[in-house]
Amino acid sequence: MNNLTKANLPVPAPRSSQPEILAEEIIERLTYRIGKDAKVAKPHDWLTATILVIRDRVIDKWMDSTRKVYETGAKRVYYLSLEFLIGRLMRDAVSNLGLMEEITNALSSLGVDIRVIAGLEPDAALGNGGLGRLAACFMESMATVDVPAYGYGIRYVHGLFRQQMADGWQVELPETWLAHGNPWEFERQESAYEIGFGGAVEFVSGHDDQPRYVWKPAERVIAAAFDTPVVGWRAKRVNTLRLWSAQPIDPILLDAFNAGDHIGALRESNKAESLTRVLYPADATPAGQELRLRQEFFFSSASLQDILRRHLQQYDDLTNLADKVAIQLNDTHPAVSVAEMMRLLVDVHGLEFDAAWDITRNTFGYTNHTLLPEALESWPVPLFERLLPRHMQIVYAINAKILVEARKARNFSDAEIRSISLIDENGDRRLRMGNLAFVGSHSINGVSALHTDLMKVTVFSDLHKLYPDRINNKTNGITPRRWLMQCNPGLTGLIRETIGDAFLDDAEKLKPLDQFARDSAFQEKFAAVKRANKVQLSNLVASRMGIKLDPDAMFDIQIKRIHEYKRQLLNIIEAIALYDQIRSHPELDWQPRVKLFAGKAAPSYHNAKLIIKLINDVARVINHDPSVRGLLKVVFVPNYNVSLAEVMVPAADLSEQISTAGMEASGTGNMKFGLNGALTIGTLDGANVEMRDNVGEDNIVIFGLKADEVANLRSDGHNPRAVIERSRELAQALSAIASGVFSPDDRGRYAGLIDGIYAHDWFMVAADFDAYAAAQREVDALWAKPSEWYAKTINNTARMGWFSSDRTIRQYAKEIWRAG
């Protein structure tokens, strides 16, 4: 790593340059904070020492930001999310502080390569996919556009699982990102709150003869706060990500331990710590469902108690809460916050119910991320009532208020009443968390124009009829700092050289790049950057998987959570059809292509895990068939996370955004790929619609059914068997899969998966196949004309600035939060 001797270690004086100062500080942290001599320091020691130097500079700005809020009385935004997929933080902080060159040079003077140590930083396992990454982008953008904000979530010990492959099957292993501590975080011992579960509710008479209710939980745990600073661009503001860790009130039962029950003596510790061990514990069992509900209430209650404590510390009055506090619920996971806020205001702080309800509704906003009814959480009423008895009472009281209003003021029918009720009575009673979030918020936003329009006529149609002014749109965005400047320094440098630095502060100022789209000299430089990124990805795949890729082939990439509606299945079926055509027609001028997949399947989602296995089975056959002549390769890259995305996104030539129309709320991967100069092939779903409007119809490849056509086809009676029989390529590909061509060890492995396409084709794989295959041949034809290809991809980069999360956050701040 380095060849330092005592003679060439930096000396304290003179402090003549920033790199020398930084190098001196790194040695100081290495010596006095880590306890290592530079001569024997290992790469992870250098990483920690460097982070501590950066962190100290962040702290000064962090404290300044906090003081400013107290001095000005500015409104604070609180973003509640079960996921924060923040990725590695060192490069992000260094870049936003404007110290990348100085830190790089300082480390180089010490014989340390910043790229090597940066690669050792653990990838925080605090999220699954788009929901968590959006929350991370929003936190960075809130700091960038000077919105005072806290993010609240859970400090998962293991978070989402680490994915490995065993004979092509997904295997879930614990992600040990906290095994050696986290130098970015600060434990806040003073910010600890009791969280209760179970027990009973007692009725007492208040001093004014008004009824009062006291919840006496049977169980209690402590929520302990850990803070991580979030640095905005140019360090204008540093906000806080506060994550909660569960701790027992009594860590060990000494009586039991001394009696010889050494395991049982730790049961309270184990029960508490299980709350914050794993993100999305499998909920196929009653115990799994209960753990998820406990997690959601745990972090929601701790966050609200913290918010009210901070507000009262400054204002000593809760009647102005909505004027000084905005709370955004990121999906339905924190929706129990509506009931908990009411409990705190009414039972703890003594407000009247109607006054508390006005404050609650004016304080909360709710972001919906799905149109899938099964993804809008609901809980069995008996489970909810057993764990949170007071909250169940409050939910029934809220429901009565809403239903009476709907019946008397709006003359709602019985069917409409059933639709808006917080209690679903179709079968066993369940508490609808999406409805609770909706009625308890003054703003309900979708995350793309199409998604927002569909919300009004599908999942929330009757609630929209009751409250027609609440639903609004805030199309998602991505932070260009991480998803261009940091992950693609080659392209960033080329853009700066070509149009200057204005885009660094305003992504929409990428537009002047348009005039270079057909400039042959610029195209050549743009292509060279893309190829270098593809070489980097090829090296990663070779080192991890032993698979050699051709960087001159088209890199066709689909990276996202594995789900049937995202249609990785459509992608791999088309790959099989292409494989058959290449073998059958070797005389044709096929374009070399590498199809790359990455993503994780939920542990209990059988079909998603089966799709991963199918991709790997198909890859094994195609990649070893000499008749393909290297024209097609299929690769599934394991353990998709932010760090892997930062390598794959800049290397993509073709971005697969092929979800069934009407089912993807927005997508942000589409934005990352487009910003980095990839051509999108996709349906008119989610933010693809707005991407088409921004980049131009000629610069995106759209295929397949539209959302209304999907809905009509389903309602009119879709006959997938007839569709399949009319498509020779599709029929042959499905037959090959179902008959075991790709699974000779288990001929029937995929029979059920293919039967689902023949029987109902709910995700329109058969319905869209021919259009998708035709669109892929259109892509091939375009790839054969490099000047045309690069003109379109340069246009994509130039026109993606509107999809910056800075724009999104400014809209939230102005139109929902009224903050900043």
Image (cartoon, rainbow, N blue to C red):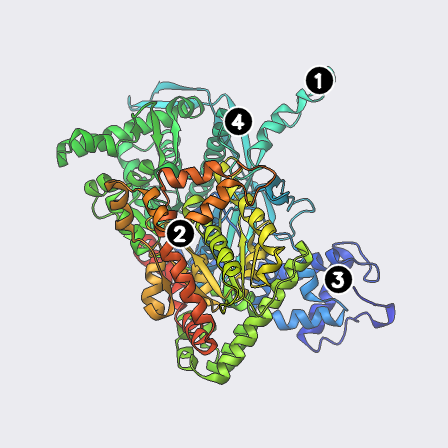
Of the residues tagged 2 and 1, which is closer to the observer? 2
Q: Secondary structure at mark 2?
A: helix
Q: Position of residue 785 (x, y in %)?
A: 45, 76
Q: Which residue is mark 2?
A: 728
Q: Is residue 518 above or below residue 455?
A: below
Query: Mark 2 packing: few (<14 Cα in 10 Å), some, or many (20+)?
Result: few
Query: Mark 1 packing: few (<14 Cα in 10 Å), some, or many (20+)?
Result: few
Residues at circles 2 and 1 in contact by the CB criterion of under 8 Å: no
| Most foreground residue, 761 or 306 | 761
Q: Secondary structure at mark 3?
A: helix
Counting the numbered discs, the total is: 4
Q: Quadrant of the N terminus?
A: bottom right
Q: Which residue is mark 3?
A: 28
Q: Amino acid at mark 4?
A: Arg
Q: Amino acid at mark 1?
A: Asp
Q: CA distance from mark 4 to mark 3?
A: 43 Å
Q: Amino acid at mark 2?
A: Arg
Of the residues tagged 1 and 4, which is closer to the observer? 1
Q: Quadrant of the C terminus?
A: bottom left
| Most foreground residue, 98 or 778 | 778
Q: Is residue 260 above or below residue 27?
A: above
Q: Is residue 682 left or right of residue 91?
A: left
Q: Is residue 81 visible?
A: no
Q: Amino acid at mark 3?
A: Glu
Q: Position of residue 459 (x, y in %)?
A: 29, 41
Q: Please give the label number shown on residue 220.
A: 4
Q: Earlier in the sequence, mark 2 or mark 1?
A: 1
Query: Mark 3 packing: few (<14 Cα in 10 Å), some, or many (20+)?
Result: some
Q: CA distance from mark 2 to mark 1?
A: 67 Å
Q: Earlier in the sequence, mark 3 or mark 1?
A: 3
The residue located at (47%, 54%) in the rendering is 577
Q: Which residue is mark 1?
A: 261
